[in-house]
Amino acid sequence: MQDRYRDLLNDYLDDQLDSLETLLVEEHLNSCAECKRELNQLKLLDWELKHQPEIDLPPELMEVRIAAIKNYLKSYESLQGNSRVRDFLELQVSIMSNTSRFLSLNPINQVLNRTAKSSVSALGKVAGAILNKKKPRLLRIIPGQA
Amino acid sequence: MDQDAIKLVRRCKENDQEAFNELLSRHEGYLYRICYSFTRNKEDSMDMLQEIYLKIFRGFNSFDEEKPLLPWLKKIAVNTMINNNKKKRLPELSFNGFRDFSDSSSGNKFAMENYLSAAHSTEENVVFDDTREVIDRLIGDLPDQYRLALTLRYHEEMSYEAIARELNQPLGTVKNSVFRARNLLREQMLACKLLEV
């Protein structure tokens, strides 16, 4: 039997055909013993599948449930614990960052920074002069004295 | 959902142990039966059930309390079935044959028949004399896609359209799965002389 007919029989069994298709299949069934036998087998199988015995519930269901809940809550608490450690570390980093920012804003630091910057600037001028081979006065005088 | 159920779900969202226990005890029978109708054995059903519980616990926060609970639980169960790599309790049944049986190749058919004949000749006779047992075994070894569609069709009594929505598959694919499953079962039951008409 071709799959096309087999599918039609399945559709017929499930009442999935429109009225014309139903009529045609029924006409065919009147003249085809093979299809008729197959349909009857499918009907019997369908009945078996629809009337399967009630599935018994095993007594272990309660144990499985309780164990699953305990395991989940345990792993959840463990995750929470990890996240608490993470939160603590993040707080520490945040405090250090704020402290550093505060120190950089401290007025004394700003004075020191300005002094340092001007020193760097002066040194930069000396260095620039050396690179441009313009001997600064200071450098010319010192060797002469030596 | 009624107010009691909403309260219970809210407690579950707060990881209340008692609430979890109460909620699961209400639905574990349904969940176990749908697992068993798919796996066809107790151990695999229990394993699958634990997986489903874990997904339920983890997913509670995303559950919309305005919607009914049971379809949400069922969706989790079905998704678990789809993704589940079933552990085979009967390695001798997991030959290539039945897995790719959809095209009804004769070699595969003989392999299954040989297995069943061998079983008949052993002390398993008593078990195999029971039609229900044989059907259970045959369904249990259908390809996953067919078995899932068959479970939803017969155990859940769902329409083809509803199954297609649930599995996110075209209607034709779902029908094809059920038809092929039935034809495989019919052929195997005929081979075991269990479908004489």
Image (cartoon, helix red, strand yellow):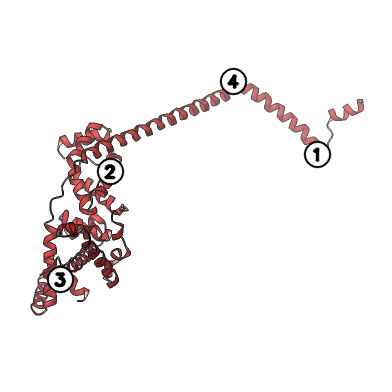
From mark 4 to mark 3, how far is it between C-alphas? 92 Å
From mark 3 to mark 2, how far is it between C-alphas? 40 Å
Question: Seen in the image, is A60 located left or right of residue A110?
Answer: left
The tag earlier along the polypeptide, 4 or 3, is 3
The location of residue A59, given as percent across then percent down, is 19, 41
Labels 1 and 3 touching (C-beta < 8 A): no
Going by the numbered disc 4, the residue's amino acid type is Pro
Labels 1 and 2 touching (C-beta < 8 A): no
Going by the numbered disc 2, the residue's amino acid type is Gln
Tags 1 and 2 on a common chain: no
How many C-alpha atoms fall within 10 Å of the one at disc 4: few (<14), some, or many (≥20)?
Answer: few
Tags 4 and 3 on a common chain: yes
Q: Nearer the viewer, mark 3 or mark 2?
A: 2
* Residue indicated by mark 2: B50
Q: Is residue A85 above or below residue A42?
A: above
The tag earlier along the polypeptide, 1 or 3, is 3
* Residue indicated by mark 1: A132
- Residue at 27 percent across and 35 percent down: it is B13
The location of residue A144, given as percent across then percent down, is 92, 28
